[in-house]
Amino acid sequence: MAAPGGRRPLRVLVSGDAEGRLGALFGRVAAAQRKSGAFDLLLCVGDFFGSAGDADWEEYRTGAKKAPIQTYVLGANNEETVGYFPDVSGCELAENITYLGRKGVFNEASGLQIAYLSGTECLEEPVPAHCFSSKDVTDLKTSLLSTPKFKGVDILITSCWPRGVERFGNTPFDVDTKKCGSGLVSVLASSLKPRYHFSGLQKICYERLPYRPLVVLGPSYLQDGLSCYALLKQFQSCESSLLKVPPCKWYLYAFSILPMSSMDPAELVKQPQDVTENPYRGPGGWERGTQQLSGAEEEPVGQFFFDLSSKPKGKKRPSEGRTGQQPQPQRLPCKPSLPTAACWFCLASPEVEKHLVVSIGTHCYLALAKGGLSPDHVLVLPIGHYQSMVELASEVVEEVDQYKSSLKEFFRSRGKRCVVFERNYRSQHLQLQVVPVPQDCCTTEDIKEAFVVQAEEQQMELLEIPEHSSLKQIVQPGAPYFYVELDTGEKLFHRVRRHFPLQFGREVLASEAVLGMPGRADWRSCQTGKEEEAAAAQAFRQAFAPFDIAQGD
């Protein structure tokens, strides 16, 4: 399909470490083109050559075989493969196979801009031929940032993955994020604001939730384009809407992209619902963030964590507020972060559907859920921009608890018990779901069992946590999780490590075991017109008034 203005998007393939298996790699590329049509170019990140002698390469080097698509590769990542790259500034290695160089920017004929950085990080002098230094990163940044009206690059490819990329997003599987990755690559990614960033070397497949590279300007913010990151394995990637090449281990990442230079600015700032904060900006701002990502030690957080990997041994730690106990280390007060773009739930945002709001407190507000499970399904939301319960300031937590207590009392007066749950995954603003369940439908134990059983069916670990514990004692800010609180005070917790069903909480409550309305599991099938929504909000507002903490005093 042609883009607006007649420009055709480029169709791009990206592969991870080939490690010399070029026949297999190009065979998969050829199969992909037969199945899905021609692609414009192939980008290879990680190790293109193997450490041992490569018989495959000799056939391509001599011209006996030819790559089926224009291919661009990064340079050496170890001493053994340095000899394959005769010119550090880049050169043609064989027909249709081009080495981009140690660092730089490749401007494709269509206007597509690709920044690249080969090798692994080295902080000592002299820098080996298969490594890059802070000077390399600074030079690359300067060459682009000095460009008039620089908005970012279309694609960034690096051998190393950026340290800290998982902050505020989904966590990679089977990799210790504290021991791998490059802080310099993180600084580069934060500065260049790529729309797509790909890397290799880690032998795993990981696609991060998209993030928005926010530029803070005093109390306001400037919208930038959206950034996506993927870490690729040998010829593998996460599934793409464009292409899936069987079997599973042979994924290629395929996507279409229109160069930024030919796009309408309004298109660049569009965002999906699951966009997150910029993972590369430190809690103390740009300067501190840069120091941390470059390898400086992070200050320990003043809190303790429950070990959820096994049953607790010995006595529980005492909860706060009881006499004769040691005070817990004080946490610095949290300030609401700036939204990554126009937020649907920040009360001051024009995106908020204000006709659904039923109560406004000092720090929080209540709103009917759009497409709720029942007419009195409500949300507790912070007025400021917080992503999860873990990030709330103490005064906001206090008001959230007050709203929860008043809602429990309200529903109890109507013969209902309520279930509270939060999904901190693929969401950017805290939404605490409060769902009433008629007492004659089922018991609290039935509800708890329904959550546990459905979690087991989906091979998810749903753990019971101490009633008097705080989420801040269990999970760190930015980590994805799912949390349920029952009317008895019992709490269930799941740490999201890979994928998580977005409608899980609703599916359990809508099931035959609880509300008996499985057809209402998806909120999109439960939406009503604006007038009906406004009438329902008005009815709830009037009924809740005697319990509303915002109307007290």
Image (cartoon, helix red, strand yellow):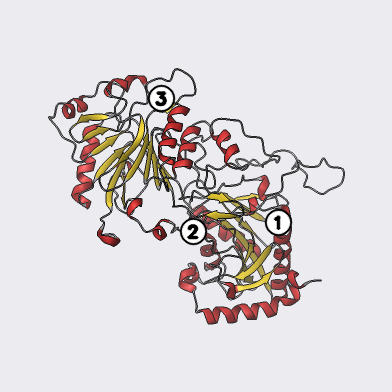
- The amino acid pointed to by label 1 is Val
Quarter the N terminus occupies:
bottom left
Measure the C-alpha gap from mark 1 to mark 2.
24 Å
Q: Give how far across and how far down residue 202 sits, in percent.
A: 42, 33
Is residue 182 visible in the rendered structure shown here? no
Who's the residue at 23% across and 42% down the image?
A: 29
Quadrant of the rendered image containing residue 550? bottom right
Q: Nearer the viewer, residue 108 or 292?
A: 108
Can you say whether 495 is above or below 530 in the image?
A: above
Quadrant of the rendered image containing residue 346? bottom right
Who's the residue at 64% across and 45% down the image?
A: 474
Quarter the C terminus occupies:
bottom right
Quadrant of the rendered image containing residue 106? top left
Q: Nearer the viewer, mark 3 or mark 1?
A: 3
- The amino acid pointed to by label 3 is Cys
Is residue 219 visible in the rendered structure shown here? yes
Q: Is residue 189 left or right of residue 57?
A: right
Q: Give how far across and how far down residue 459 sits, in percent.
A: 49, 50
Q: Which mark is residue 397?
A: 1
Measure the C-alpha gap from mark 2 to mark 3.
41 Å
**Furthest-front residue in this view:** 148
User: Mark 2 or mark 1, which is nearer the start of the sequence?
Assistant: 1
Q: Mark 3: which secondary structure?
A: strand
User: Label 2 belongs to which residue?
Assistant: 502
User: Label 3 belongs to which residue?
Assistant: 131
- The amino acid pointed to by label 2 is Leu
Who's the residue at 40% across and 58% down the image?
A: 265
**Furthest-left residue in this view:** 64
